Amino acid sequence: MRRLVVMVSGSGSNLQAIIDAQADGRLPVEITGVISNNADAYALTRAANAGIPTSVLSHKGRKRSEYDSELAYLVSTIGADLVVLAGWNRLLSGNFVSHHTTINLHPAEPGKFPGLGAIERAFDAWKSGEISAGGVMVHYVPDEGVDDGPVIDWKPVPFSIDDTLETYEQRVHTVEHELLVDSINIVLGQLPPTGA
Ligand code: GRF
């Protein structure tokens, strides 16, 4: 069974989607750990409720290169074939991604609205007539690029005429939850055979 470490910073609804998919057999993995850079993340409660070991490693006051090396070591001690960034809000340098196959979820189409606040920025762009649909994507994280890297899968999220930020955001999350699980399954099929 492939081992998954999930890294989170916030509410963890996407972590929950992974936990649920694992529990009902849609995701054939062992979730070996959940790591957060934020001790207050509700995602940690979700993990604990599911019996998954959690770790907190705060980045506050840390030099990025040193923090990322420590994080990479922590993931190695937990054991992971794949690291999933599910609402992880911090850029990762080569000191991390050169050690672990890492994928990231971003609530926008490939190439659009990199960085934090993507849902709000997409909504504002739709309101001002610049775009007609938003999207969500999952991509590999090969380097320090912000929400950039080979795309594993993505889906458009259309706007409705009566959308508020809240209704759009809700729809984005619903699409994310499905896309993330599907994308992890795609990546599991692309990983080198165990022992290779
Ligand atoms: C998601 O919209 C994700 O795409 C973005 O942060 C949000 C995390 O939500 N990077 P949750 O913590 O999984 O509920």
Image: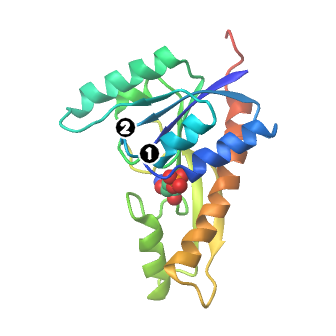
- Give the residue number, with chain letter if any, for mark 2: 92
> Few, some or many C-alpha atoms within 10 Å of disc 2 (few <14, some 14-19, many ≥20)?
many
Identify the residue at image location x=50%, y=82%.
Answer: 126
Quadrant where the N terminus sits is top right
> Residue at the spot x=38%, y=59% of the render?
116
Q: Is residue 79 left or right of residue 74?
A: right
Q: Quadrant of residue 5?
A: top right
Which residue is tagged 1?
A: 88
**108 is higher (above) or lower (below) than 64:** below
Circle 1 packing at 10 Å, graded few (<14), some (14-19), many (20+), is many
What distance separates the C-alpha of mark 2 from that of mark 1?
A: 10 Å
Q: Amino acid at mark 1?
A: Trp
143 displayed left or right of 155: left
Q: Residue at x 47, y 64 (%)?
A: 112
Residue 183 can be seen, yes or no = no
Mark 1 C-beta to ligand 1 under 8 Å = yes
Is residue 68 visible in the rendered image? The answer is yes
Q: Are marks 2 and 1 in contact (CB under 8 Å)?
A: yes
Kindly identify the amino acid type of the residue bearing the numbered disc 2. Leu
Colour setup of the view: rainbow
Residue 41 - label = none
What is the x, y in percent for residue 189?
74, 31
Q: What secondary structure is marked by label 1?
A: loop
Name above or below for residue 56 compared with residue 114.
Answer: above
Q: Hey, which residue is sitting farthest top in the picture?
A: 195
Judged from the image, the secondary structure of the residue bearing numbered disc 2 is loop
Q: Is residue 140 left or right of residue 120?
A: right
State the residue in front, 42 or 65.
42
Which residue lies at the image location 43% right of the left edge and 72% below the top edge?
120
Identify the image quadrant of the C terminus.
top right
Tell me the mark number nearer the camera, choosing from 2 and 1.
1
Residue 127 spot, x, y in % from top left: 47, 87
